[in-house]
Image (cartoon, coloured by chain):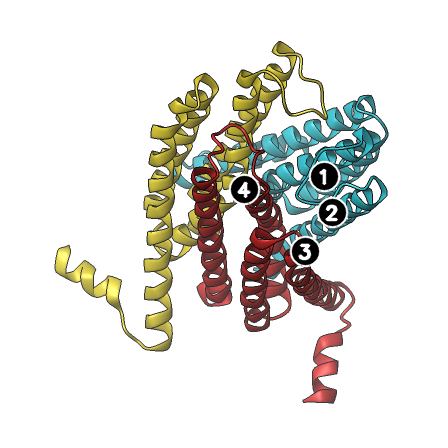
Chain colours: A red, B cyan, C yellow
Amino acid sequence: MHDQVAFLAFVTLAAVLEQAYFSMQVIWARRKYKVSPPSTSGHPCFERVFRAQLNCSEYFSLFISVLWVSGLFFHQGTSSVFGLLYLYTRYAYFHGYAESAQGRLKPMYASATILWILIGLSTAGLLDYLLSAYFRVEILKSLGRWFL
Amino acid sequence: MHDQVAFLAFVTLAAVLEQAYFSMQVIWARRKYKVSPPSTSGHPCFERVFRAQLNCSEYFSLFISVLWVSGLFFHQGTSSVFGLLYLYTRYAYFHGYAESAQGRLKPMYASATILWILIGLSTAGLLDYLLSAYFRVEILKSLGRWFL
Amino acid sequence: MHDQVAFLAFVTLAAVLEQAYFSMQVIWARRKYKVSPPSTSGHPCFERVFRAQLNCSEYFSLFISVLWVSGLFFHQGTSSVFGLLYLYTRYAYFHGYAESAQGRLKPMYASATILWILIGLSTAGLLDYLLSAYFRVEILKSLGRWFL
């Protein structure tokens, strides 16, 4: 089983490290702008860092879910590459948002696009699996024969 | 391994799509009620949509966790059916909450009930597995022999 | 496959139950301090309970991710024990935070430490697997031979 998921596990670990980095940025912003817990409002710069982290955190489990579904049912390598790209766009999003609300937009669209690609790969992989398992229709294999 | 998790992966994908739909509702509510990020307060209608999405998002990973544990250790089909029911109650919750704070209550109780059922199935499945693996006591099999 | 993940699934189930307990505490705090949804601000005691639950909820998916990666690639038993310790420190964090912002600090550091240990175990396990699978270098096995 390990060889089917090693790269997915690697991207998952990288995603956790990225979230840990974002959380530390919030702690530093709390100190810099003197916003003591449990308060979450104050200087706009703090609020942007706080919202950026919260947004990445909300999307974390969605990302991990489609990463694994597409990795298990479509193709592990492809999913892992898009997974790493996603983490890069999230990094750009976080720092863009920390600078200005405007700065978050471009990487936000990029990260959403990659998430939709992973959703698409998951759907393709799952449909292909279910069709071939229950109806003996093998779409991806036939497509592969045409193109490769 | 794929046949043990295909339906769980399918429900997971549906859950991700539902969360994506909720996120888009928040973006539309931000535009409609003119609440620019990073702010999260403003018109009560926006605040309700925002809170509804945040609440669904918080429960997302709890739901996915018990879906997979009950699916792997109790029964994949049963867990997947309750998983789809859960997604339906979350949809009702989101739109109920968007209309009024009162409107969230009934589907909230329904979704909580299904989550508890999945927790119950997970507990039953895990206990049965651990007892049969370490103490050679096979509860579910014996029950099955009585009822089926 | 079940024997590779049964204990991880058990700790996951315990983590879900803990989050359910935290959520109920927020509902009770809402009633006690009369803070009706969608509002999330009011009496500082309510705000602390609310923030404590939100923080635990944010870390939930990070925790589950490293629990499973370290459990699959390092050692299931070791990861499960650290997983249970993590849940204990989160319990202490929640009740510490509910009493005072100061009270959250000690268990927060403890829970962060355990999370870093799980990240370390995941990294060690994954590196060892990838090195042995692609470069036939077996670090953990050799270390084991020296120490055991």
Residue A72 place in picture, x, y as percent: 59, 63
Residue B3 lies in what quarter of the image?
bottom right
Circle nearer the viewer, 4 or 1? 4
Q: Earlier in the sequence, mark 3 or mark 4?
A: 4
Are callouts 2 and 3 both on one chain?
Answer: no
Q: How many marks?
A: 4
Circle nearer the viewer, 2 or 3? 3
Residue A46 disc label: 4
Q: SS of the residue at dot 3?
A: helix
In the image, taking residue A126 as reference, residue C78 lies left or right, namely left
**Residue C121 in the image: above or below residue C20:** below
Residue C60 disc label: none
The kind of residue on which mark 4 rests is Phe
Are callouts 4 and 1 both on one chain?
Answer: no
Q: Which residue is mark 3?
A: A102
Residue A131 place in picture, x, y as percent: 76, 66
